[in-house]
Image (cartoon, grey):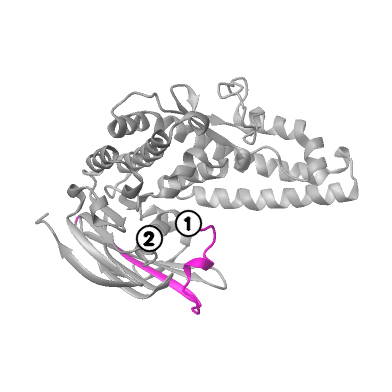
């Protein structure tokens, strides 16, 4: 699959933008702050229903506008699909497929992309929420219905937390909260599915992660992922957590989750928050058996983050009926040394469409400079082809 045409209206610093694209590599070049990242961010939004830079939609709507519109014509072989998304400053967002209204959460079923960005360092060195988001975005692209499960879980979690806070304020004892049992059942039903999906995904990433890391580093540092689950007593906020602590094999996820809520209920009433569930989980990234967060060098951290994105792309490529995902590299090469630049370029060379942003064209490896688009102050000011590819 590739994006054949991208149109933006009132998105970020673009009042209007029309960009015709094709298979192969395209480099978007311009000084910092001109709007290169805004273009590729919009493609990523269609795939994940979120931005890699901000948590909400308001910043994506141009100042003074009531809504932003993203239109992308996707092509796969002889088939084309027009996706349109309207981000509203007030009210729910709206989406269309080939001019017919659909739920916005359906879009990741059709638009697949993997975005590499400087922010990916946080996957290795940042908070657990960054790693949870990485896994969840990949899950939604592979199984779009899970976006609904995640939204339902968040609603139940919010209601349960509200009840816990109210009980704490009123000083109610544990045995005076029958309503909490109802919320517990719903939380466990939804949360157990998310936990199982994440754990299965972590297992599936193992082989492509090892291959991708080796392709970038050409060394065997034994990259590995291990789930750290709050329902098994793990505390993602504990920097000294035992990374080898095994999950309890004697019970299924629902039973472990239910038991964790029972044990933690007094502490939850004391603090007014839910202390177990997928919203509290983490995944430990290991190199040579040690947590990458504390032991990996800057270069190793970058390599691990890039390998995770490449592994994600491989899973999407393997599962998709519409071909490769679009690969987006947002100002990544400026962060890498020459060896990693060349090896990353070689690793992604076989994907159908690669979009690269760069402030300095010389940072981009030559195999990826097939077509150049110049960006200036929210405008596309020039295009040129450098090869016959």
The answer to whether 103 is drawn above or below residue 262 in the figure is below
Query: What element does badge 1 sit on?
Result: loop
Q: Is residue 122 found left or right of 360 in the rendered image?
A: right
The answer to whether 37 is drawn above or below residue 64 in the figure is above
Quadrant location of residue 379? bottom left
Residue labelled with disc 1:
53
Q: Which residues are magenta?
A: 54-77
Quadrant location of residue 336? top left
Q: In this orientation, does residue 75 appear?
A: no
Q: Is residue 389 found left or right of 320 in the rendered image?
A: left
Most extreme residue toward the left is 388
Residue at point 28% right, 32% down?
215
Whole-percent x and y of residue 301?
43, 36
Query: Do residues under tags 1 and 2 come within 8 Å of each other at their CB atoms?
Result: yes
Residue labelled with disc 2:
37
Q: In this orientation, does residue 130 appear?
A: yes
Give yes or no for residue 74 being in the magenta stretch: yes
């Amino acid at each position: 699959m590739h994006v054949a045409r991208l149109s933006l209206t009132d998105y970020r610093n673009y009042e209007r933008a029309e960009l015709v694209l094709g298979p192969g590599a395209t480099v978007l070049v311009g000084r910092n702050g001109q709007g290169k990242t805004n273009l590729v961010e919009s493609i990523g939004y269609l795939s994940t229903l979120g931005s890699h830079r901000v948590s909400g939609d308001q910043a994506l709507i141009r100042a003074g506008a009531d809504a932003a519109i993203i239109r992308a014509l996707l092509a796969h072989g002889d088939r084309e699909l027009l996706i349109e998304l309207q981000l509203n400053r007030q009210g729910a967002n709206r989406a269309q497929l080939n001019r017919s209204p659909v739920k916005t959460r359906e879009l990741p079923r059709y638009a697949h992309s993997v975005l590499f960005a400087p922010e990916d360092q946080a996957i290795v060195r940042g908070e657990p929420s960054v790693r949870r988001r990485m896994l969840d975005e990949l899950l939604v692209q592979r199984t779009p219905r899970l976006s609904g499960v995640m939204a339902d879980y968040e609603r139940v979690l919010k209601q349960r937390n509200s009840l816990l806070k109210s009980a704490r304020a009123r000083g109610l004892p544990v045995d005076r909260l029958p309503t909490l049992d109802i919320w517990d059942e719903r939380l466990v039903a939804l949360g157990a599915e998310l936990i199982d999906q994440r754990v299965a995904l972590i297992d599936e990433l193992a082989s492509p992660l090892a291959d991708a890391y080796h392709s970038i580093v050409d060394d065997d540092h034994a990259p590995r992922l291990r789930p750290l689950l709050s329902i098994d007593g793990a505390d993602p906020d504990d920097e000294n957590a035992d990374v080898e602590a095994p999950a309890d094999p004697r019970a299924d996820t629902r039973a472990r989750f239910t038991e964790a809520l029972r044990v933690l209920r007094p502490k939850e009433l004391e603090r007014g928050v839910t202390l177990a569930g997928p919203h509290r989980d983490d995944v430990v990234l290991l190199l040579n058996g040690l947590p990458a967060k504390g032991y990996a060098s800057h270069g190793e951290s970058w390599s691990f983050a890039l390998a995770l994105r490449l592994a994600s792309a491989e899973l999407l490529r393997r599962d998709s009926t519409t071909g490769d995902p679009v690969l987006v590299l947002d100002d990544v090469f400026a962060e890498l040394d020459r060896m990693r630049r060349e090896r990353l370029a070689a690793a992604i060379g076989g994907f159908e469409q690669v979009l690269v942003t760069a402030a300095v064209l010389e940072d981009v490896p030559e195999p990826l400079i097939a077509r150049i688009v110049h960006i200036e102050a929210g405008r596309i000011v020039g295009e040129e082809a450098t090869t016959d590819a």
